Image: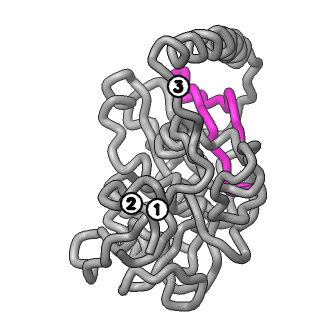
Amino acid sequence: MTTTPGNASSHLPGKPPVVDRATWQAAREELLVREKAHTREGDAIAAARRRLPMVELDGAVEVTGVDGPVPFLDLFQGRDELVVYKHMWYDGAPHQGQCEGCTTTAWHVKDTVYLNARGVSFAILTSGPWDEVAPYVEFMGYTQPWYSVRGVEAPVGGEMGHIACFLRDGDRVFLTYSTTGRGNEPVNGSLGLLDMTPYGRGEAWEDNPEGWPVIGDVREGHPAEGRQACWYWRSDADGVATWGPTSRPVPQWTRPGATPVKTLGRHGHHH
């Protein structure tokens, strides 16, 4: 059984040292100096990102969605800016066999009303054939628009696993930015919150104090081969962490109509 908020904290491994509030406040303020510098550097990088040159592409190229083939320009929905996530696809795989990293990214943007209100449209593109993609989207309960870009050249098609940003000027369309790997992390708010917690993401690559629990063997860009953690958590319908053919990323079990999954602890075990 794993340690949960309802269990005795004395079972927690590698706990931070206990100090008085004044000592904690001093340490917190010391870290805040670094955090503020990090924020300002992030602002400077974002400013440089906004100054990147852009590449024109053919906005008439067709992608396939619920309404059949439509020009890429339609994805803007009349707005000037468009953000897409390019979802990897494994042909012929069962729903639970699709990319868990992409699944997690898509799950965190089920609703994009705030982007829309800011004048930014959002869509998910995938290299999968539409006849496979459509039932997957229904199975997952996704509400954002999906499109197949099968056979479409980059930057609309091409390599998947990327966030890409586009700008339109009338009927002209431009690629302004693209990122992949850990550049995709801003979409996943859970990772940012985990980075604030004392145990972090629980991944082997993290720099943790001696004795801290490691519950996942994720390497950048690769699924965990052994222990499951963080964005790669998988379980079967009974809530048992597994990498087998009955596994699915945990949120899939919370979709409408899904068989309820037993509560999972931080380490993916029953309790």
Which residue is label 2 attached to? 4
Residue 230 tag number:
none
What span is colored magenta in the figure? 157-179
Callout 1, which amino acid? Arg
Front: mark 2 or 3: 3
Question: What residue is rendered at 39% in x and 23% in y?
Answer: 119
The alpha-carbon separation of the residues under discs 2 and 3 comes to 23 Å
The alpha-carbon separation of the residues under discs 1 and 3 comes to 26 Å
Front: mark 1 or 3: 3
Q: Are marks 2 and 1 in contact (CB under 8 Å)?
A: yes
Q: Which corner quadrant of the image does residue 40 belong to?
A: top right
Question: What residue is rendered at 72% in x and 43% in y?
Answer: 209
Query: Callout 2: 10 Å neighbours few (<14), some, many (20+)?
Result: some
Callout 2, which amino acid? Thr
Q: Position of residue 176 (x, y in %)?
A: 68, 27
Q: Secondary structure beneath disc 2?
A: loop
Q: Position of residue 267 (x, y in %)?
A: 51, 67
Q: Which corner quadrant of the image does residue 17 belong to?
A: top right
| Pointer 2 or 1: first along the chain | 2
Please indicate whether residue 172 sits to the left or right of residue 179 in the image.
left
Residue 266 tag number:
1
Question: What residue is rendered at 49% in x and 11% in y?
Answer: 22
Question: Camera-side residue: 137 or 250?
Answer: 250
- Colour scheme shown: one colour
The alpha-carbon separation of the residues under discs 2 and 1 comes to 7 Å
Which residue is label 3 attached to? 19
Query: Callout 1: 10 Å neighbours few (<14), some, many (20+)?
Result: some
